[in-house]
Image (tube, grey):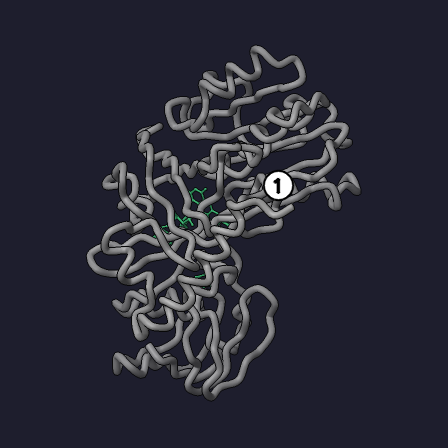
Amino acid sequence: MMTARPLTKRFLRQAIRVFDAAATPYGVDRYVELVRPSWSSTEVRAKVVRVERTTPRTVTLTLRPNGNWAGFRAGQYTQLSVEIEGVQHTRCYSMTNAATDRHGLIELSITAHPEGRVSRHLRQSATRGQVLGLTKAQGLFTLPHAEPDHMLLISGGSGITPVMSMLRTRCALGWTNSVTFLHYALTESDMLYRLELEELARTSPNVRLVRVFTDEPGTGDLDGFLSLDQLNAADPGWASAEAFVCGPAPLMDATRTLFEERGRGGHLHTEAFTLTQFTAEAGTIDGTVRFGASEIGRPSNGTPLLNQAEAAGLTPLHGCRMGICHTCTRTLCSGVVRDAVTGDLTNGPDVEIRICISIPVGDVEIDL
Ligand SMILES: Cc1cc2nc3c(=O)[nH]c(=O)nc-3n(C[C@H](O)[C@H](O)[C@H](O)COP(=O)(O)OP(=O)(O)OC[C@H]3O[C@@H](n4cnc5c(N)ncnc54)[C@H](O)[C@@H]3O)c2cc1C
Ligand code: FES
């Protein structure tokens, strides 16, 4: 039997579609958002309901998304958009709360980078009541549906966010198998969620917490950077674990090497927040990059076009800087670029490319 509520919702949606067509060219959203900014007929938007400056460099935001949000799996991220000085910027942030949360709220923790535009802005200026743009949850770095016999969660710095959501979700689901949470922070005061994690480890016999404060030897549970000895000490059962790691490239590389040496590469799941390797090949980087719309030309330096544009003083829109969000897509007017992730070549003219992962091969013109 159909209830009155879905019928009302369907009627409302149809009414909005009719009104939207009548409200062309701006659409109904542009009118309604004047009185209720978090409302949209199609876009995900969220109101900030809580702001906590959790460590000297982080801000934790609790958001109430509108009805277009469809939930998430632990480990996934959203693309957050915020207006700074009249310009819309988009960046990826991982949800940190349990994916089982029934209140419809989501939590994000953002670490300010010294030069970072969006992270510094949110750390300094995010306020209760502010409305932010989001996308539906994305990403394949997720907690498995079935409980593994043993889990190892490894994170460094801001990389704690997706694995925190995995740990919280696992606890909310009442999973009882063992889990080791190995986290690297510069100092004790830099460690996000420290008190909650310490409390959890104290009260849950199946949760083992290992803290490493790399700038303050002697203050954590272990010292130094990830090595075989350290991993054996942190989690003697690591070689049989389903493992999830998120953090700086050296931590991810060291973990990958240890798992592959043990033939356990297939049980290691990784999430990177930045792309660190570019595949410019010797002899292919000579040439000139021309930013057509800005009438700027300069010799190529072999890095992705986004970096070269920024070095030339331009400020192109971008999000993830690693080819996943498509925010930086621009038209390649002429020339050839190499995809820094796959190595594939793309020829102009007039093809859309993601400039954050496109390295020019010879002379290139881009519509920037
Ligand atoms: C899937 C995914 C999930 C993410 N989840 C989170 C999260 O939960 N919490 C969080 O704090 N961040 C997260 N990030 C990183 C986030 O998207 C931004 O990259 C970060 O906040 C910096 O943005 P910005 O605008 O402050 O810096 P920008 O103004 O874009 O960059 C400023 C400078 O910092 C460098 N830079 C940019 N990003 C990083 C980085 N991540 N590490 C080191 N240097 C960088 C740039 O190369 C540039 O030189 C995630 C990224 C991805 C791809
Ligand atoms: S910035 Fe995300 S794809 Fe380029």
The residue under label 1 is 254
Residue 304 appears at what percent x and percent y? 44, 68
Q: Residue at x 57, y 41 (%)?
A: 75
> Of the residues shown, which amino acid type is indicated by label 1?
Ala
Q: Secondary structure at mark 1?
A: helix
The quarter of the picture where residue 367 lies is bottom left
Viewer-side residue, 27 vs 99: 27
Q: Left or right: where does residue 51 sit relative to residue 106? A: left
Q: Is residue 9 above or below residue 294?
A: above
Viewer-side residue, 225 vs 126: 126
Label 1 residue near ligand 1, CB within 8 Å:
no
Q: Is residue 91 above or below residue 51?
A: below
Residue 215 appears at what percent x and percent y? 42, 27
Viewer-side residue, 145 vs 357: 145
The quarter of the picture where residue 201 lies is top right
- Label 1, residues with CA under 10 Å away: few <14, some 14-19, many ≥20: some
Q: Is residue 325 above or below residue 122?
A: below
The quarter of the picture where residue 61 lies is top left
Q: Which quadrant of the rendered structure holds the C terminus?
A: bottom left
Residue 224 appears at what percent x and percent y? 53, 28
Q: Residue at x 33, y 61 (%)?
A: 29
Q: Residue at x 41, y 62 (%)?
A: 15
Residue 62 appears at what percent x and percent y? 38, 35
Judged from this view, the residue extending furthest toward the left is 85
* Image mark count: 1
